[in-house]
Amino acid sequence: MLLAGAFGLLFALTAARTIGWQDSGHFVLRVVTGELDNHYGLALVHPLHYWLAAGAVWALPLEPPFAIALVSALCGAITVANVFGILLTLIGRAGPAVLAAVALGLAHTFWRHATLPECYTVTTALLTAELWCLVLLVRTGQGRWLLGMMLASGLGWANHNMALLTLPIVGLAALDACWRRGGWAGAGLLAAGAAVWVLGSLPYSSLIAMEMARTGDVIATLRSALFGTRFASNVLNPVPGIRTLAISTAFTLLSFPNLFLPAAAYGLWGARRIGVPGRLHATLLGALGIHLLFVIRYDVIDQHTFFLPLYTLLAIFAGIGFASLARWKAPIRRDVVRVMVVLLALTPLLYAAAPELARQTDVLAPFARNKPYRDDYRYLLWPWAMMDVSAERMSRHAMELAGDAGLVVGEDSMGLFALKYQRWRMQREAVQIVPELEAEQAREALEQGRPIVLVPQTVERPSTPAPRGHWQREGDLYRLADD
């Protein structure tokens, strides 16, 4: 509880306070406008996270992005505590469990997503709950842990499709446990486990069933549910993308500037030496291998985001690795622990310095987006979402320039969600927001004397031609002005 409370407070203090770019902005907009559907397909709905977020917005007297980000903070803290619990159950020693759990909580990518209104720490909270129940099931053979494991797995699918990756693992564990019981007792427990899994999955499986009934197209619905409407080729891609894998590797090294990765490597083969049962070791290795194979060939620009379950599994092996140090001589063991503690303490300082260190070498030059009011170095390298208010500044300035009924052209599709959120927040329903400026839209706005505002994709080089006069720069945005 102490660990969960400490990280819950840390994540809450650094959580996003305002609307953001990209997927997080889209999710907040969907919640505040009551739009459960996602135009990218069923796979992007994430219904469990949606309803948790909607409940937080309803219950907490906070700005919606902050309320929703607190869901991520809570689930991030639960993940850290669950990793500690798994390791304490596996190895019976608190010290190694604390080291591994704290290293995960301070990891750059994990910390960042524990402060954003996105679904990934909900995924890791349910994954670790599933694994903890699995460990307890193997240790005790008690049926309640099988039911808990299946419930967590079903809820995981209701949140994100990545939960399906470990379904074969938990399914085999359930079959093994029921086989050991034998007879009607085993069959009854297996049926109860399947029923509990379906119950947990209902927020998503019911949506799939309703969509099948509505469209009558089973194949298209299943395709949308498993892959969405745009990302099937990415999900099924068999070959790793060199560039995205290199970026993900860099974020992995940034996330663990300590002894976490060597400890995890040591723990991969040292589990049996400290008494971890062979079945559990093989099960955890299987889960790690499935996630690794999935993520390294999932060729999307934010691939490193999908490493979070992998990091969570590696944390378990890191704890096993630290526990294996008991076999080393005491002076060496103490020195390793001291080094790890110091490196963990220095981790936030490294993150604080990372933007300026990277800026000196211009390492982000090939990836810089130069969005309005956004410093790409701080945006990407600070894990604290509360420090970035660029989408809020951009969208609020656009609404101010647009007045009560202006026309806003958002060249960057990833900024449109923030613009629409700000329109909702400021109650400017008459403001028109479009991704590109069509001649008829421009003509009507000019005839009616409405302001036309341009939000450029790249601040210095707006790509939309001025329909009349010229674009006059206002801060990082542009307003149409007469010559």
Image (tube, rainbow, N blue to C red):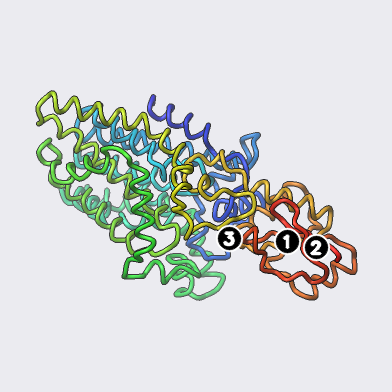
Instruction: Report x, y in % for residue 426.
Output: 76, 47
For marks 3 and 1, give the one nearer the viewer.
1
Residue hosting label 2: 480
Residue at x 83%, y 68% (from the top left corner): 469
Which sits in the foreground, 202 or 401? 401
Looking at the rendered structure, the secondary structure element under dot 1 is strand
Q: Amino acid at mark 1?
A: Leu
As measured in the structure, the alpha-carbon distance from the residue carrying label 1 to the one carrying label 2 is: 8 Å
Instruction: Report x, y in % for residue 199.
Output: 42, 51
One can see residue 458 in this view = yes
Instruction: Report x, y in % for residue 200.
Output: 42, 50
Which sits in the foreground, 79 or 20? 20
Residue hosting label 3: 37
Q: Earlier in the sequence, mark 3 or mark 1?
A: 3
**On the rendered image, what quadrant is the N terminus found in?**
top left
Marks 3 & 1, CB-CB < 8 Å contact: no
Residue at x 17%, y 50% (from the top left corner): 282
Looking at the rendered structure, the secondary structure element under dot 3 is loop
Marks 2 & 3, CB-CB < 8 Å contact: no
Looking at the rendered structure, the secondary structure element under dot 2 is strand
Q: Residues within 10 Å of mark 1 (few under 14, many from 20)?
A: many
One can see residue 280 in this view = no
Residue at x 54%, y 55% (from the top left corner): 23
Residue hosting label 1: 454
